[in-house]
């Protein structure tokens, strides 16, 4: 199939991935790592996955500290297609900056935003969904890909889908976005069949996104367009931009105003949020998953995830569902069940002044 | 108190301590390590503990591979007092060689054998018991210090004590030695009050030990005395000596013949057999014991033993009664309950040809 005319992919490459410490660090965060043993980093895999949709029109937005590493991992990208944020100002500023830059070179462009650190094994199903989303977006809608929930997750927001849209294979009107629910509500959402995970995959005309933003946050929209018109204004304007997530800034109010469409995403999706999530993505043998060299691992009764890096022996005796992550300067021992709490190690290290380890 | 005239301490320094891998290795076994954070290795602490009984008359028997390290750790010892075994031939040959060497220079000597890798916190109580044992041994008995059981251990042999001996404060005739029991029998032994742990602490005239050995293993006794008379014969004689433990070779048959006396050992004793044992010897804070630098450990919910070595961060999240041992080339993760199975890691490494890690 040909690529999608007028479609631009925006890849926000941010987030420290602190729940994946000590693999993920501030200096080499999750998206720069090959966490699936595929030989490609999450960022590279994200761009690879987009290639059949758009080879030439990919924009990555990342922190200034990582721009060089991003360019190094994506040599096929024109250097100007890697936008460097002077400081973190949340997802609306990041995606909005890319939208404004794209809008200037292609006023009718449809953009799709796809985080650099998510995993989608079924690329073909992803392409089909995005192609439909782009067609819907051409009509002026803000489209979100709604992931079919596999379990009542409490770590994601949900989108409630409503009536089918005429003229498209699967698209539905979005009724509302809801925040991360508690376990009881999540169970009810999943049981209802009406709710889907909000994976942050938005497809929309660049101009529509910025115009919607202009309704609720006019200064933010104006600031982003000012920088796109004159990149030399970046450092002056950026620090004054409102720090807000794209969900709160645009998606939620736009849904309430009837402007949002959900295209079902009938494919596996994982944000690799923690080591339990990572373990579920990788093949296991007798309950044991090894990322790195399996030759470096000795197990005498035990299961879970072992991550090796560089020749040290890791021995596991008699522990089930454990997570052991070995790196040159730090080793983590936890369980799948407590994987979410790994970020508290990073907090503790920061509190004790050991940012060199974070 | 003065030292004990005519008393020689024999310190067998052997055993790989495979259940303490990866701290204990073939190249630097348990007795060469400071496992209590005291600043002294187990070997040094053993010799320190003996000093009030005999400063000048200490003999260490160790494998040829470790003789240099032993001499390095005990610079106060005359080099000739460190006997190097050409190969491991079990405890009877090791202690018997020392006995024969001591017998030649001091025919009336009483020797006491005390393993180099055991921990006895109450040195004063130890001294009192040994002093009594030496006086009993001067009368020609084979004396063993019987440790008061603190729990129905299945990992030690037991000694059954009988009638009190006239003329000594606490000594009793030994009825029999029994092998490591199962849990049911161990419980019965402890409940009876008649049984004590056999900690391998024997006190006996050197000549009596060798004469008793001569009854049941005449060639072994003769071989040891031959080497003591002419050390140049060591390499020729040693490989032909019977490999047998002192318990089987002498203690058990001598007890059956009525020649063994038990002196109660009313002090804490630990053979530091595994990491569970090691953890119990060290102070804990909120359930966590750290051997090494506590500054290198970050815990977010969790308890057990963490051993650090050299600056790497060890982070523990949400695991109780865990054992994490970090060394430069290997990290072990297990539990207190499974600590005995650590030796199976060493077996597996040997099986896979990785003796460099054992």
Image (cartoon, coloured by chain):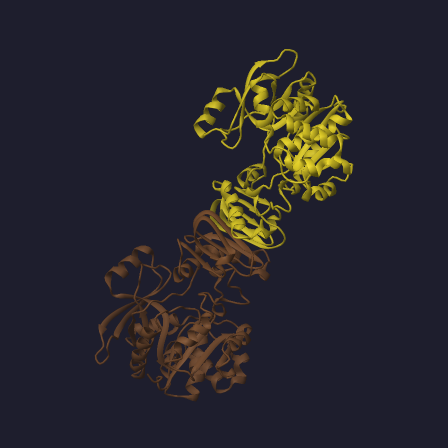
Chain colours: A yellow, B brown
Q: Position of residue A26 (x, y in %)?
A: 61, 45
Percent position of residue B56, x then y: 43, 84
Residue B25 seen in the current view: yes
> In the figure, is residue A61 to the left or right of B168?
right
Residue sitting at x 34%, y 57%: B182
Frontmost residue, B304 versus B204: B304
Task: Judge left or right: residue B309 versus residue A80.
Answer: left
Residue B108 sits in which quadrant? bottom left
Q: What residue is drawn where x is 36% and y is 84%?
A: B3
The image shows residue B142 at horizontal and vertical percentages of: 33, 77
Q: Nearer the viewer, residue B75 or B284?
A: B284
Q: Nearer the viewer, residue B141 or A283?
A: A283
Q: Position of residue A92 (x, y in %)?
A: 63, 30
What is the tally of numbered marks visible in this picture? 0
List the single residue furthest toward the top: A166
* Residue A2, quarter of picture: top right
Residue A345, placed above or below residue B123: above
**Relative vertical location of residue A309 with respect to residue B99 in this rendering, above or below:** above
Position of the N terminus of chain A, as image quadrant, is top right
Residue in the image at 56% along x and 56% along y: B312
Give the vertical position of B38 relative to A131 (above or below): below
Q: Is residue B45 left or right of residue A296?
A: left
Residue A53 seen from this side: no
Q: In front: A28, or B156?
A: A28
When asked about the image quadrant of residue A115, the answer is: top right
């Amino acid at each position: 199939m040909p690529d999608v005319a007028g479609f631009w992919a925006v890849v926000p490459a941010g987030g420290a991935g602190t729940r994946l410490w000590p693999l993920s660090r501030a200096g080499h965060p999750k998206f720069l790592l090959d966490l699936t043993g595929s030989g490609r980093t999450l960022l590279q895999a994200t761009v690879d996955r987009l290639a059949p949709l758009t080879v030439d029109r990919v924009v990555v937005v990342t922190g200034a500290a990582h721009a060089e590493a991003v360019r190094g991992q994506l040599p096929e990208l024109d250097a100007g297609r890697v936008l460097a944020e002077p400081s973190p100002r949340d997802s609306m500023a990041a995606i909005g900056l890319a939208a404004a830059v794209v809008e200037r070179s292609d006023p009718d462009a449809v953009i799709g935003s796809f985080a650099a650190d998510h995993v989608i094994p079924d690329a073909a199903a992803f392409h089909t969904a995005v192609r439909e989303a782009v067609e819907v977006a051409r009509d002026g809608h803000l489209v979100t890909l709604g992931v079919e929930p596999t379990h009542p997750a409490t770590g994601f927001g949900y989108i409630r889908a409503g009536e089918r849209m005429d003229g498209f294979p699967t698209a539905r009107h979005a009724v509302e976005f809801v925040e991360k629910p508690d376990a009881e509500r999540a169970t009810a959402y999943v049981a209802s069949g009406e709710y889907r995970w909000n994976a942050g995959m938005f497809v929309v005309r660049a101009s529509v996104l910025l115009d919607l933003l202009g309704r609720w946050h006019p200064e933010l929209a104006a600031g982003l367009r000012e920088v796109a018109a004159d990149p030399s204004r970046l450092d002056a304007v950026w620090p004054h931009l409102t720090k807000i997530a794209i969900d709160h800034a645009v998606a939620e109010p736009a849904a309430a105003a009837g402007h949002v469409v959900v295209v079902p995403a009938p494919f596996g999706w994982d944000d690799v949020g923690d080591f339990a999530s990572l373990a579920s993505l990788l093949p296991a043998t007798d309950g044991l998953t090894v990322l790195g060299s399996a030759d470096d691992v000795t197990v005498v009764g035990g299961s879970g995830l072992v991550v090796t890096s560089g020749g040290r022996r890791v021995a596991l005796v008699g522990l089930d569902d454990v997570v052991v992550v070995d790196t040159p300067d730090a080793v983590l021992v936890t369980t799948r069940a407590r994987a979410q709490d790994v970020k508290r190690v990073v907090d503790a290290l920061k509190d004790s002044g050991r940012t060199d380890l974070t």
